[in-house]
Image (cartoon, rainbow, N blue to C red):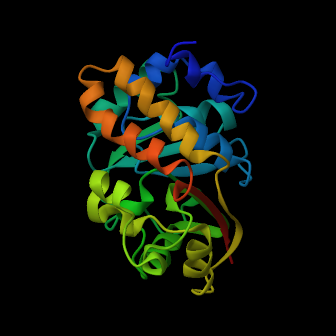
Amino acid sequence: MTDLDALVRPDRYPRSSRYDPAWLLGLDMGPNPLWLLEDLARDLDLRPGMRVLDLGSGKGATSVFLAREYGVRVVAADWWIGADEAAVVFAEAGVGDRVEAVRAEAHALPFEEGSFDAVVSIDAFEYFGTADGYLPYLVRFLRPGGQVGIATPAMTREVRALGAIPPHVKDVVGWEAIAWHTPEWWRFQWEVTELVTVTSARMQRDGWRDWLLWARACAAFLPDGRAANQPVIDMLTADGGEFLGFALVTARKG
């Protein structure tokens, strides 16, 4: 089995396995986004016709997946990828009529309050969503009963509890790991606001292995991929699931 073949896993991710892994790697901005989204969506109630904000949508793979797999109308919002660039991806994937690309910064969202049925964020929330005031800001854009779901890099124990970032993690990502929280941290952080009820907060099963498979495929497939991904491969191999993974967290607005 090649590294690219390892990204097709119908036993674990049947929906994601219908997508060309080369196409997905060509849109790379973070590890295994469709696997994360497919797993997260099991804890959400996404129904055709819903209006969903894909926050931190990158080059658009997750927005394509949401539109195709769940029949929702998507607003794909990202700060680093221009709307024109993302719109080309959506048109080529045949979902241009169901996905709107918007360039937006997460703290200055250009939307009306109460205009979304759900907000989904895959491998992005750690960059803007850990501040105490962010969830109260974000839920303003949800309708009553609306849902929020995130997949974000996580630690099995809080860095504060450990007393330091583990050396094999610090060597690769530096201070960034202080924003990688446990599912329990996210549950408290959200529920203490009394604005949402957390419906699920869990570590993705073998999330570090999925991440490793993705890094190996990027190293083998992408131009200059070895230089960019070998440190991540070494970090995950050294970790072996002791500290690293992904938190999948969902909640419903009260």
Q: Nearer the viewer, residue 40 or 211?
A: 211
Q: Hey, which quadrant is residue 72 in on the image?
A: top right
Q: Is residue 104 visible?
A: no
Q: Nearer the viewer, residue 252 or 110?
A: 252
Q: Measuring from the top left, give residue 78's x and y in whole percent.
A: 34, 48
Left or right: 230 in relation to 32: left
Where does the C terminus fall, quadrant-wise?
Answer: bottom right
Q: Is residue 249 visible?
A: yes
Q: Measuring from the top left, give residue 218's x and y in whole percent.
A: 38, 26
Q: Nearer the viewer, residue 150 or 63?
A: 150
Q: Residue at x 63, y 81 (%)?
A: 191
Where does the N terminus fall, quadrant-wise?
Answer: top right
Q: Nearer the viewer, residue 186 or 159?
A: 159
- Does 194 appear above or below 214? below
Q: Measuring from the top left, give residue 61's x and y in whole percent.
A: 47, 33
Left or right: 229 in relation to 208: left
Q: Measuring from the top left, give residue 67's x and y in whole percent.
A: 59, 35
Left or right: 163 in relation to 231: right
Q: Hey, which quadrant is residue 247 in on the image?
A: bottom right
Q: Residue at x 73, y 45 (%)?
A: 47
Please identify the residue farthest to the top as the structure is shown: 1
- Does 37 appear above or below 126? above
- Does 50 appear above or below 148? above
Q: Residue at x 45, y 50 (%)?
A: 123
Count all numbered tags in the image, as a single digit. Answer: 0
Q: Hey, which quadrant is residue 182 in on the image?
A: bottom right
